[in-house]
Amino acid sequence: MNQVYLQLLRDKLQRRFKQLSESEHRNFHNYLNVFWDFLQSPQFKTILENLAYLHPEMEITARNFVIELEQSVKSYPPFDDTFEKQSAIAYFIIKECIKRDDNSKVEYLVGANYINNFSQEESINAFISYVVRPLYEYINESLEENTVISYFLVRYKHRSEWFQRENLHNLYKSKTGKGEKNLCLNLYEYLFEQGIDFSIEPWSISGEADLVLDKSSDNPVIADAKIFDGQDKNKSYLLKGFRQIYQYTLDYNQPFGYLIIFKICEEYLNFEVTQNNQSVPCVVHNNKTIFFLTIDIYPHEKTASKRPKLKSYIIKESDLTEAMKTEED
């Protein structure tokens, strides 16, 4: 995997944290907004979304804590005995602070509560130490190969839909029998050009690529690409591909897998899963997280706002759960 890129991400994160830590206390809220905006980039947003999903109960804890401080209600700083949960509390506290304007001085109130000291300088320093730093350290420790892959896959999706839609659709149509294979190769070529080291498993007799593994890493990346046309390559076909990816995560003892879907029909394809508010929808089962990245390469004649209401193919979380049970059985 591209360790150089990971180090660049860590260096950039460290610089932004240092900038926030050394900012003027009277303008701290503005600097916190800048830091928060930086964390919304795809490389870090996936980590934060997953943290929020794992510990949703901490959002209520953080919200109540901030509201009580604003109402001058005696409150105690929320603590937890695990690093991950404490990081989730920090994330939701910052999220609450971002919702407020600078005049609220909410960061000052939070920091003062942690150290029972109402000095502006010491209170802001406490906010950095007890709230910002835990989240910064969690993100830094969570940056791994999976983060890099997620980032580049989303970039590939945008590249394909914005600039290469017609070319990719023609690539599929030129040799329909090998269309899926050709699209897979286009994806692999893109990943290779980004400096990601991987190997392609030998093709089966049917000519379909099995998976991509970064065997140079201690954490091989498991991915597969499938066509969806709403006909032969339909919902059942995707569920079969999903089941295969899930089985690979079990075989290789890896926490993540990716199912990349090239949609070549006009109709919509939606995943109704719990974690559908993320950059890339996913489903979590048995400590395995499978991501679904749909790439629409159908050459629509009209923009999305002008298209008539079309049929939607829906894959529900219950469908995916049933597919995993079938594999486990």
Image (spheres, rainbow, N blue to C red):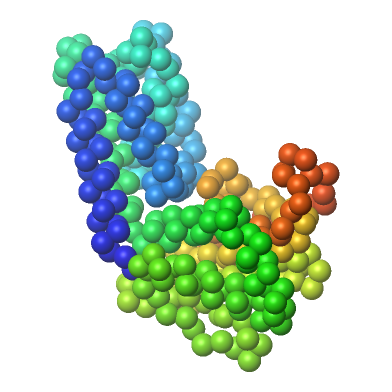
Q: Is residue 235 visible?
A: no
Residue at x 22% of width, y 48% of height = 11
- Which residue shows up at 41% across the image and 43% down it? 41
The answer to which of 47 and 266 lies nearer the viewer is 266
User: For residue 197, what is the image quadrant?
Assistant: bottom left
**In the image, residue 36 above or below residue 156:** above
- Residue 64 lies, in percent from the top left, at 44, 21
- Is 232 on the left-hand or right-hand side of 185? right
Is residue 25 at least partly visible in the picture?
yes
Q: Nearer the viewer, residue 58 or 214?
A: 214
Q: Foreground residue, 106 or 209?
A: 209
Quadrant for the C terminus in the image: bottom right
> Which of these two is toward me, 85 or 206?
206
Q: In the rendering, at what x and y percent does residue 177 appear? A: 71, 82
Which quadrant: the N terminus?
Answer: bottom left
| Residue 131 picture location, percent across and down | 29, 31
Measured as percent of width and height from the top left, residue 36 is found at 37, 33
Vertical order, 45 against 6 (above or below): above
Q: Which residue is pictured at 19% across the width and 13% down the height?
A: 120
When asked about the image quadrant of residue 133, the answer is top left
